[in-house]
Image: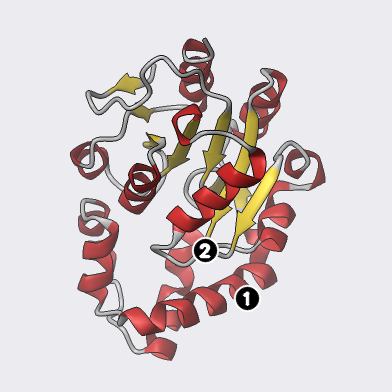
């Protein structure tokens, strides 16, 4: 079951919107990313990740990982753009996490709106989701910068006419929690993605999700 944490911002406002991250939350792209990180490091001249460092980095915040790799802030948009192109060419190698299709179907059936905010492109997300599952998402706000999700969150809320207090953002990294907090939304963190449970807990999301069913249970409990 979901682990509720004492960070609560929800009060008694029912959840009307769930905003998902994509990579590491809905799509299992971690192994694929590790397969291309050396190529990225050579092209953009940052530190490569050694096999024995992968687990250590899972216990670091998003900003700490960037600092460890020595990536300059001005390079990040260039890296993101190149990475989106690589994903587009290799989307067939990236699969959804088990349970993602059922999660999206059952969540849509509850009447809750679903949005996607990701640094990946909409075309890539739709390709990996497949036409049927992509159609369950009501709004796409893609191509965000690595630490630029908050403006995308605000755009989604404005376009959909939903207050921040009635929205739940779900991701797998500390930056997802930080962006949700900046906008005033509830933050949920999945434990099957990139960051470790310890570092996510330290960033005090409203809840942790150990499996997709936990998301459905949490939304059902906060639908009013």
Can you say whether 84 is above or below 3 in the image?
A: below
Residue 156 in view here: yes
**Residue 188's x, y, as percent?**
39, 33
Mark toward the viewer: 1 or 2: 2
Q: Which residue is mark 2?
A: 144
**Residue under the image location 31 percent in, 21 percent down:** 3
Can you say whether 216 is above or below 160 in the image?
A: above
**Residue 1's x, y, as percent?**
39, 16
**Residue under the image location 27 percent in, 53 percent down:** 58
The image quarter containing residue 209 is: top left
Residue 96 in view here: no
* Secondary element at image label 1: helix
**Residue under the image location 70 percent in, 40 percent down:** 137
Instruction: Give whichever of 165, 57 is nearer the camera.
Output: 165
**Residue 160's x, y, as percent?**
65, 40
Q: Which residue is mark 1?
A: 85
Q: How many marks?
A: 2
Can you say whether 34 is above or below 149 in the image?
A: below
The image quarter containing residue 202 is: top left
Q: CA distance from mark 1 to mark 2?
A: 15 Å
For disc 1, the neighbor class at 10 Å (few under 14, some 14 to 19, many from 20) is some
């Amino acid at each position: 079951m979901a682990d509720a944490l004492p960070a609560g911002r929800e009060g008694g406002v029912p959840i009307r919107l769930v905003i998902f991250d994509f990579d590491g939350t809905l799509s299992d792209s971690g192994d694929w990313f590790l397969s291309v990180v050396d190529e990225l490091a050579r092209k953009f001249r940052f530190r490569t990740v050694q096999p024995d460092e992968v687990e250590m980095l899972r216990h670091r915040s998003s900003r700490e990982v960037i600092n460890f790799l020595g990536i300059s802030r001005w390079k990040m948009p260039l890296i993101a753009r190149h990475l989106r192109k690589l994903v587009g060419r290799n989307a067939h190698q990236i699969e959804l996490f088990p349970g993602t299709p059922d999660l999206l179907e059952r969540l849509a059936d509850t009447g809750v709106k679903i949005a996607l905010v990701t640094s990946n492109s909409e075309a890539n997300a739709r390709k990996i989701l497949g036409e049927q599952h992509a159609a369950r998402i009501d709004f796409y706000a893609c191509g965000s910068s690595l630490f630029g999700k908050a403006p995308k969150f605000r755009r989604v809320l404005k376009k959909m006419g939903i207050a921040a207090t009635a929205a739940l953002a779900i991701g797998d990294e500390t930056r997802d929690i930080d962006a949700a907090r900046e906008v005033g939304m509830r933050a949920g963190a999945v434990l099957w993605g990139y960051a470790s449970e310890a570092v996510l807990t330290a960033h005090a999301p409203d809840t942790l999700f150990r499996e997709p069913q936990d998301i459905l249970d949490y939304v059902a409990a906060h639908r009013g």
